[in-house]
Image (cartoon, grey):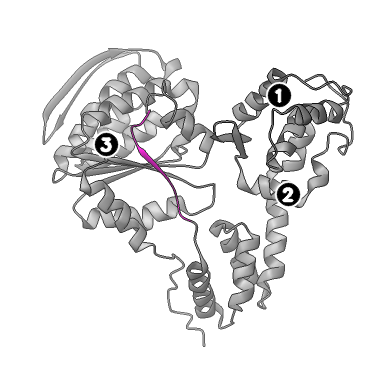
Amino acid sequence: MVNPSAEIDWHYPRTALAQGYLDTLRAGLISSLVLFAPRRKGKTEFLLDDFLPAAEAAGYLTVYCSMWQNRSDPLAALLAALAEAAKPKTLGAKLQHRLLRPFKKTSLEFELSHVGKVKAEAEFNAKDGGSQAQLQRLPELIDSVVAASKGKVLIAFDEIQHLAKPEFQELVAALRTTLDVRKKTVKTIFTGSSRNRLQMMFSQIKAPLFQFSQSTDFPELDAGFVAFMAGAFRQATGRELALEQANAAFLALGSTPGLFHDAVERVMKMGGVDIAGVAQGVLTEAREASGYAQRLMEMRPLDREVIRVIVARAPLYTDETRTRLALAIGLGGEPLSARQVQVAVERLLAEQIIYQAARGVYEIEDHQLGEWLMAAPQMMGAGDIEGDEPLAP
């Protein structure tokens, strides 16, 4: 029986996982974590509904900022989040109005109850948005958040891979410097949905955040999540989802909770309990909306063939592979050079289509694209797409 007045909780709690991450940070051996998972895997929901509440219960003052909140100016979004956390409310309003907007020349003076007056004079133009002056405020704002806390602060940076772009290098370097000297009081957690960009930020020797944070894969949800969703569905509709069918649908959707949510919502609206059939429709629509076929059509033939080799998990640089690549793009039986193959690999890396899993080993960056390629191998051949012309690599 459905109770129309009952409020249904659709959030699947991951309390133990949140506590595990928090215990790791509190132990003090590391001060930062990087969580990787593809998009729509539930990272943001986990941060907001599980991890940050657990941190607050443990006495941390928490700050959340998505690097996608203001894609053209993530620094402004971060400063606004810090100002809001610093309290009192009047400080946040004043900073957002006076500090975060572009100006030519001004003298800033404001008082933080915990650290006294802060005064600075800066000159810059509206074109660059005042990034240098704003960067100078970053340490002071973080210190004000620390002072407003009980000595423990946790900052969550969502979709941090957005800062891997060259135009944000100064911000990333400033973050590293600012956070490095505050490790004892300021803990951080980063999430990202691009392995390649996370590697660019945290794993490359010359990267500003090199070895700053411990990286880990965000665990996949399992049958417990499916059972929870089936229970919420029962509360909402009075209908029963067959667990075996629901689990199969979840796996067919790449164990992606965002897509499974879409499927459950659609079943609720349509009536019935055919979660398997609805899930297939959701998956097809998601793949069509992603533009995978169009992306492949716009690629160079060699790049497509290199992806085919990667999907097949075959070695890239052997004589046999390079000969097959040459034949596939219409260049005859003479094998391509290793450098020609490497150039294609570098293009695919730069376009975030693949990432380097290990030395000489590459994987498809977007797991849904990888699954689509495995399900539609006919799209992989250079000659299978209308309009292909043999092009020099």
The amino acid marked with disc number 3 is: Ala
Check disc 3: other Cα within 10 Å, few if <14, some if 14-19, many if 20+. many
Q: If the image is split into quadrants, where does the C terminus sit?
A: top right
Spot occupied by residue 232 in the image (x, y as percentages of width and height): 49, 74
Q: Are marks 3 and 2 in contact (CB under 8 Å)?
A: no
- Callout 2 secondary element: helix
Number of the front mark, 3 or 2: 2
Judging by the rendered image, the residue that carries numbered circle 2 is 374
Which circle's residue, 1 or 2, is located before the other in the chain? 1
- Residue at image position (48%, 28%) is 200
Horizontally, residue 293 falls left or right of residue 204, namely right
Check disc 1: other Cα within 10 Å, few if <14, some if 14-19, many if 20+. many
Q: Main secondary structure of the magenta part?
A: loop
Judging by the rendered image, the residue that carries numbered circle 3 is 83
Judging by the rendered image, the residue that carries numbered circle 1 is 341
Examine the rendered structure and indicate whether residue 16 appears above or below residue 227. Answer: above
- Residue at image position (28%, 57%) is 54
Which circle's residue, 1 or 3, is located before the other in the chain? 3
Horizontally, residue 70 falls left or right of residue 261, namely left
Farthest residue, direction front: 319
Check disc 2: other Cα within 10 Å, few if <14, some if 14-19, many if 20+. some
- Residue at image position (11%, 36%) is 113
Spot occupied by residue 34 in the image (x, y as percentages of width and height): 39, 41
The amino acid marked with disc number 2 is: Met
Spot occupied by residue 340 in the image (x, y as percentages of width and height): 72, 19
- Callout 1 secondary element: helix
Find the magenta span and give its range: 210-219
170 and 221: which is toward the camera: 221
Disc 1 from disc 3: Cα separation: 49 Å
Q: Can residue 19 be seen in this view?
A: yes
